Image: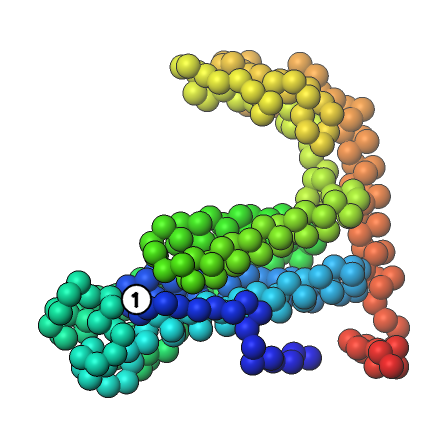
Amino acid sequence: MFHHSKDLQFNARVSKPDPIFANILLEQFGGENGELAAAMQYFTQAFGAKQPHPDKYDMLMDIATEEFSHLEIVGATIQMLLKGVNGELKDAADQSEIMQVLDGKAAKENIIHAALRANPQFPIITGGGPTLRNSQGIPWCASYIHSNGDLTVDLRSNLASESRAKIVYEHLMKFTDDPYVKNTLSFLMTREIAHYNMFEAALESIQPNFPPAVLQADPRYTQQYFNFSPENSFTGPWNEGTMPSTGKEFEFVADPVAYSKETKGLTELPDDKKAELKETDALNAEMSEVKSAEVKKSEPKGVAQWSDYDSAE
């Protein structure tokens, strides 16, 4: 159940029209890293989390709803940036604050051309309203959404999504000098960081959560770092020392071509890890049973009912 408040979560303001930036800002309205994409991603992920992880369902729905509110903030800001462009455009160019975007007393046609260059959809196709397209006019697409049905996978996707959205806002702030718009963008960028922390904490609360999903890694192939760039190669914590999460040691393969030939395409390794393979097979069976039982146990018996209205009283 959604309830709409007509007041924005953040008091978005604009000091002057800017149709060019309004078009750029469409990236966060209908773009692949925008607010609608985030809202729909978390919204769809929540359904699969409802039974086994009702607490995470609650979190995902809350954050999805906040992302919808951010979509409203972005849409409202775009609309305000087009003030004077909509409606009777030529009269507005002569009489209103739209002249602030021009250098001096430029011809009124200049602002029309500026709006058209920014995005012809604003004054012609949509009558001035933002649409679910990015700054290049490409329609929003459901392929932007990452929802894989395993919460540990989905939460890692969300960490990446919040990171991408954060950097987009960071870049957007470079293209406006409006202090009010900058404040709005800063708020939205900061909430991406806040959501990142929430998803990170939620992932940590699910144990075990590595590797993602159910099946374990094949122990024969987890430790090798193949040095495919032999000239001026770098070493670091990604190819030497102890591996994160597993506690095993990296194996630096200096010459991958020779190594592949010596091992007959990695089929005859110096250590066949037979004991570890047996442990992995046993763990795969155990984790499969645990994950399956986790979902089955949480499914209601008899008539399925999503909401428990009695407990809400």
Q: Examine the rendering and report whether any part of residue 279 can be seen.
A: yes
Residue occupying the point 48% across, 18% down: 234
Could you say which is closer to the camera, residue 249 or residue 22?
22
Packing grade of label 1 (10 A; few <14, some 14-19, many >=20) is: many
Which SS class for mark 1? loop
Residue 264 shows in the view:
no
Quarter in which the N terminus is drawn: bottom right
Residue 240: which quarter of the image?
top right
Q: Give the residue furthest to the left.
A: 107
Picture quadrant of residue 114: bottom left
**Residue 27 picture location, percent across and down:** 40, 61
Q: Position of residue 50 (x, y in %)?
A: 75, 65
User: From what the image shows, is residue 175 above or below residue 62?
Assistant: above
Is residue 55 found left or right of 132 in the rendered image? right
User: In the picture, residue 230 is in which quadrant?
Assistant: top left
Residue named by callout 1: 18
The answer to whether residue 188 is left or right of residue 276 is left
Residue 143 x %, y %: 48, 61
**Residue 73, position as x, y percentages in the image:** 49, 69
Q: Quadrant of the C terminus?
A: bottom right
